[in-house]
């Protein structure tokens, strides 16, 4: 790898190959790659990050595809992060879908990156954030992050976006339940996709009702909106895009106080994630090298101690001396 | 709360109310509750833990319901942990389902516990394991753990079971993709549920083919099996139960070497999870109290540092002095 500042310069100049290379190096856990991230950091924070989440099969990828198209036509540059093993963006779907998506592969203004495993940052959300930072430093205007909306990691990633779209389809009873169980809380915009299907109006009304039933918010908070789309038929996309822009404007009003608050929240989570993974990795590394880890596992297996007590002892020994 | 050893005694005697109370106390993060867990630990490790995982809508809960029924008829006691926001066991599904499940609520030999949030252990998998330990110490013969098979946490929970069932349904193209992306690796038994639906035979053959295509295993490794069931119509359950017992016997042959290996792997993961969450919680607590955390977030917001460097600095300061 070339020296870190040179690589950072190239990426900040928007060089696709340098960015792709860095992302591979990050996947491979190369320490130099992390040095590049540090250099890119001051140049990031300008892109608008949009999360697109929902169960498999609700049409997130097709919707993402339409949003890319819409943003490109408006002259915006776009980065895509697909944190979804079933997404055609990550090569996971049937051939027809994959080919349809690849039209953007030839467009210099679009950079698509898929993430399927945790990678060397330990957490999927930390890996996703690293990729977002790179796309951001490249100067992308919008970054679309597609996630399957089940699982804590993925809810976290969705929540890390400035504008979060939660996508559902008509008649998916289970999905509405999943929405209740957490996703509704992170949604800035709700999308009923495949709105040409039976039951779309019902699902739309159900979502409006659910939003109404939520505990009262402060009057100046954002009121989530519900949209009906048919991504396949390219219907309702303009209206949805209008909603995205309205939310973006909402975050920017009053000198961008809401945006700063959102950014602070994101930074806190990003720092804490890195801290958590980093301190754990270092501690396990130490314990592996000095044989302590295997000794503890053996004690546990023979029930000479329990996992709770063993963890407490290790933590006390590791941190106490530093704080004394 | 009563004193820890008294509570532990009651739970080990199988007292449902004491167990339910402990689980609530664990949710509330009461330190005494953790003391009880430590005492229960020597008495756990005897139950056979079965993971049941798959996308929403594949019928995991109905299948779980049938397995409970089958195990109860064989005179076995059963614990259920539902780590699935859409599960009727956790009160998340439509009314009909919930009522159907409640027949077990009146059966003393069945204890059902649902988990929807991370709880005070930090991770969903740590919370699930704590509940499994309690059910185990209560003397349950079988513990069924139902999870939605998307998301890293849930794959981890599934992998923590001794016998893992991965459930799918005919014609769910996306689901087969998701299987490829990780779940297949953890499956001891694959279940094509709703096997009376069109395309069941095709899905069955696809799964057999996928298993064949996996990289060659050592000859004495378990060869995953595929079953077709219709949980709703109570078909194929006896055969599936036979597969579960065959896997359980496989783990126990040769003096239980495979079971010990599986238990060692589980203990390692359990200890490491507790270590990770514990060391992080302690560090954040220290940093919050001395104001360091807010100072770092402000530095990050004003781009005086980057999250990677900030985390490295904190970790070095926290751990270095202890290891010198």
Image (cartoon, coloured by chain):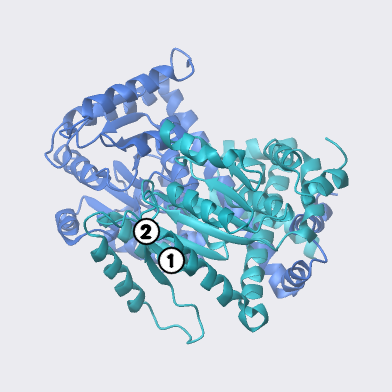
Chain colours: A cyan, B blue
Left or right: residue B228 versus residue A12 is left
Q: Chain of mark 1?
A: A
Q: Secondary structure at mark 2?
A: loop
Q: Secondary structure at mark 1?
A: helix
Q: Is residue A169 above or below residue B267?
A: below
Q: Pick whichever, B52 or A51, lies toward us.
A: A51
Q: Identify the mark at residue A239; answer none if there is no mark.
A: 1
Q: Is residue A241 above or below residue A131?
A: below
Q: Quarter of the image for the C terminus of chain A: give it.
A: bottom right
Q: Is residue B28 visible to us here?
A: no
Q: Residue furthest left?
A: B233
Q: Is residue B120 above or below residue A233?
A: below
Residue at image mark 2: A229
Image location of residue B213, percent across then percent down: 43, 18
Q: Is residue B91 visible to us here?
A: yes
Q: Chain of mark 2?
A: A
Residue at 66% across, 50% down: A277
Number of residues whose C-alpha sits closer than 10 Å to that of mark 1, classed few (under 14), some (14–19) or many (20 or more):
few
Mark 2 vs 1: CB contact within 8 A: yes
Image location of residue B241, percent across then percent down: 23, 31
Residue at 25% across, 47% down: B61
Q: CA distance from mark 2 to mark 1?
A: 9 Å
Q: Is residue A22 above or below residue A79?
A: above
């Amino acid at each position: 790898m070339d020296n870190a500042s040179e690589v950072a310069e190239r990426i900040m100049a928007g060089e696709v190959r340098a960015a792709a290379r860095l992302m591979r190096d990050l996947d491979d856990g190369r320490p130099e790659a992390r040095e590049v991230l540090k250099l890119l950091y001051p140049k990031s924070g300008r892109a608008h990050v949009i999360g697109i989440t929902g169960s498999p099969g609700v049409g997130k990828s097709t919707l993402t595809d339409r949003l890319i198209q819409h943003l490109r036509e408006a002259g915006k540059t776009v980065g895509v992060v697909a944190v979804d093993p079933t997404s055609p963006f990550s090569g996971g779907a049937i051939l027809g879908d994959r080919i349809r998506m690849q039209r953007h592969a030839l467009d210099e203004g679009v950079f698509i990156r898929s993430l399927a495993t945790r990678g060397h940052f330990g957490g999927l959300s930390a890996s996703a954030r690293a990729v977002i930072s790179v796309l951001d430093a490249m100067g992308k205007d919008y970054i679309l992050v597609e996630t399957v909306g089940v699982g804590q990691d993925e809810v976290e990633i969705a929540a890390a976006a400035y504008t979060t779209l939660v996508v559902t389809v008509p008649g998916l009873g289970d999905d509405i339940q999943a929405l209740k169980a957490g996703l509704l809380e992170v949604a800035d915009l709700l999308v009923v996709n495949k709105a040409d299907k039976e039951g779309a109006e019902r699902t739309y009304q159900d979502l409006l009702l659910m939003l109404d039933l939520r505990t009262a918010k402060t009057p100046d908070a954002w009121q989530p909106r519900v949209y009906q789309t048919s991504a396949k038929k390219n219907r309702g996309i303009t209206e949805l895009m209008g909603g995205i822009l309205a939310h973006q404007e909402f975050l920017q009003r009053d000198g961008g106080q809401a945006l700063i608050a959102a950014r602070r929240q994101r930074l806190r989570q990003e720092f804490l994630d890195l801290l958590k993974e980093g301190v754990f990795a270092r501690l396990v590394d130490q314990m592996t090298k000095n044989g302590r880890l295997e000794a503890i596992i053996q004690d546990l297996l023979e029930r000479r101690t329990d996992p709770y007590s063993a963890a407490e002892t290790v933590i006390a020994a590791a941190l106490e001396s530093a704080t004394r």
